[in-house]
Image (spheres, rainbow, N blue to C red):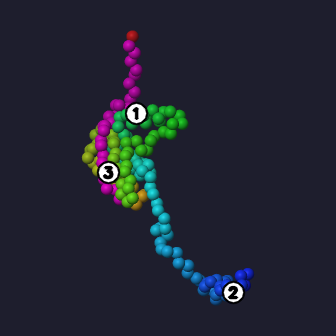
Amino acid sequence: MRDAGLPNRPEPPGAGSLGERGGKSVEVPHGGDPGSRGRTTIADGVVGKIAGMAARDVPGVHSMGGGFARGMGAMRERMPGAGGKSVTSGVKVEVGEVQTAVDLEIAVEYGVSIIDVASDVRENVIAAIERMTGLEVVEVNIAVGDVHVPDEDEEQPERRLE
């Protein structure tokens, strides 16, 4: 027994230096897999950002959100210090313990197959959310609110009434 400064106290098993124990390692029980020790919560906004980024990555998606949201986003982009584009514009999510559901509103480019773009968006969003969060995506609802025509980008000259 080592002198620990406390009389008549037995030394706990595995105590002492390696030399005293003959160089054997002592296994300390911990109660299982480290991944099961605690809880991870994922905010709705996190899932919304993932969904928004994944949807925008799909060819044929011009923008996200309805007309008003896109207009506000365009104004926000032009204002210095306003934060630029909102990644979650046109995205609504509901996040539970192990599942999530996503609603998206998009505008597509003129000439693309809306059905194909919607299918590609759904596939990309599901893959990104499930890979990054581990949540099961139970549904991705897509509302196509507009078709972007290239001529719409050109600014029309302002007319004055005289």
Q: Are there few (<14), some (14-19), or many (20+) residues within 10 Å of tag 3?
A: many
Residue 71: mark in rendering = 1
Q: Which residue, given by chain and number where applicable, does mark 3 sit on?
A: 140
Q: Quadrant of residue 146?
A: top left
Query: Would residue 23 be found to the left or right of residue 76 on screen?
Result: right
Magenta segment, which residues? 136-161
Of the numbered discs 3 and 2, the one sitting upstream in the chain is 2
Q: Nearer the viewer, residue 35 or 143?
A: 35
- Is residue 155 highlighted in magenta? yes
Separation of residues labelled 3 and 1 (CA atoms): 24 Å
Q: Of circles 2 and 1, which is in front? A: 2
Q: Which residue, given by chain and number where applicable, does mark 2 sit on?
A: 8
Specify the amino acid type for callout 3.
Val
Separation of residues labelled 3 and 2 (CA atoms): 68 Å
Q: Quadrant of residue 156?
A: top left
Residue lying farthest to the top in this orientation = 162
Q: Is residue 98 above or below residue 11?
A: above
Secondary structure, mark 2, is loop
Q: Is residue 124 above or below residue 60?
A: below
Q: Nearer the viewer, residue 162 or 3?
A: 3
Secondary structure, mark 3, is strand
